[in-house]
Image (tube, rainbow, N blue to C red):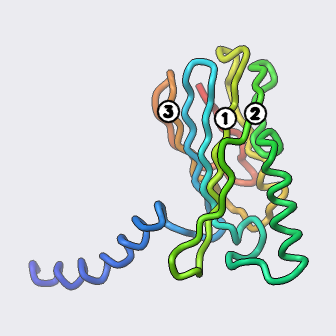
């Protein structure tokens, strides 16, 4: 039995290394969102395969593809377009980072999107709706991990269940 583990480990290790290089498992249609809540501020860090948002991961080749990237960037300029907080918290959004990160082979690309929400009434911050699903049909789920005063939570947002409870 001990000898069987060595070949299995050798087979699995390239997959693990690929995930570590890329920061997470790159799965089309699936993204990751990390949320940190601290006093009056919420910071979100979204990583999502570019394919789920524009239909391709390589550099754009046509005017249609360039337009898809430009449209995405325009929408991402305002985090409130895709991340809607309950109104009672009175949050104002700001983009901190919006970059496309490509792997070394040029086969895969992820959107790395960092946003900040300052809330005038943080005690009223109860939930966030992720509305990306309505605009991007290739997107099937976002794994959401949050940490804040109420502790750590992990959940999965999907098109039919896109509301994340924050407290």
5 lies above or below 78: below
Q: Residues within 10 Å of mark 2 (few under 14, many from 20)?
A: many
Residue 119: image location, x then y, percent: 71, 21
86 lies above or below 58: above
Q: Residue at x 84, y 51 (%)?
A: 75
| Residue nearest the viewer, comparing 148 with 40 | 40
Q: Where, quadrant-wise, is the N terminus in this rendering?
A: bottom left
Tell me whether circle 3 and circle 2 mark residues in contact (CB < 8 Å): no
* Distance (Cα) linking label 2 and label 1: 6 Å
Q: Residue at x 89, y 69 (%)?
A: 67
Q: Residue at x 83, y 44 (%)?
A: 81
Looking at the rendering, which quadrant does residue 125 occupy? top right
Residue 162: image location, x then y, percent: 72, 45
Residue 12: image location, x then y, percent: 32, 77
| Residue nearest the viewer, comparing 113 with 126 | 113
Residue located beneath label 3 in the image: 147
* Distance (Cα) linking label 3 and label 2: 19 Å
Earlier sequence position, callout 2 versus callout 1: 2
Label 3: which secondary element: strand
66 lies above or below 72: below
Label 2: which secondary element: strand
Label 1: which secondary element: strand
Earlier sequence position, callout 3 versus callout 2: 2
Residue located beneath label 1 in the image: 116
Q: Residues within 10 Å of mark 1 (few under 14, many from 20)?
A: many
Say the numbered circle drawn on residue 93: 2
* Distance (Cα) linking label 1 and label 3: 15 Å
Q: Residue at x 62, y 40 (%)?
A: 44
Q: Residues within 10 Å of mark 3 (few under 14, many from 20)?
A: some
Tell me whether circle 2 and circle 1 mark residues in contact (CB < 8 Å): yes
């Amino acid at each position: 039995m001990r000898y069987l583990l060595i070949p299995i480990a050798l087979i699995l290790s390239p997959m693990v290394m690929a995930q570590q290089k890329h920061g997470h498992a790159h799965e089309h249609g699936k993204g990751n969102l990390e949320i940190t809540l601290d006093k009056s501020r919420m910071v979100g860090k979204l990583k999502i395969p570019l394919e789920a948002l524009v239909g391709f991961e390589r550099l754009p080749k046509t005017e249609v593809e360039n337009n898809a990237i430009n449209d995405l960037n325009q929408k991402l300029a305002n985090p409130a377009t895709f991340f809607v907080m309950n109104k009672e918290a009175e949050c104002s959004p700001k983009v901190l980072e919006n970059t496309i990160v490509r792997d070394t082979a040029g086969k895969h690309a992820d959107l790395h999107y960092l946003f900040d929400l300052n809330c005038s009434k943080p005690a009223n911050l109860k939930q966030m709706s992720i509305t990306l699903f309505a605009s991007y049909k290739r997107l099937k789920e976002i794994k959401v991990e949050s940490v804040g005063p109420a502790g750590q939570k992990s959940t999965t947002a999907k098109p039919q269940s896109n509301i994340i409870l924050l407290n």
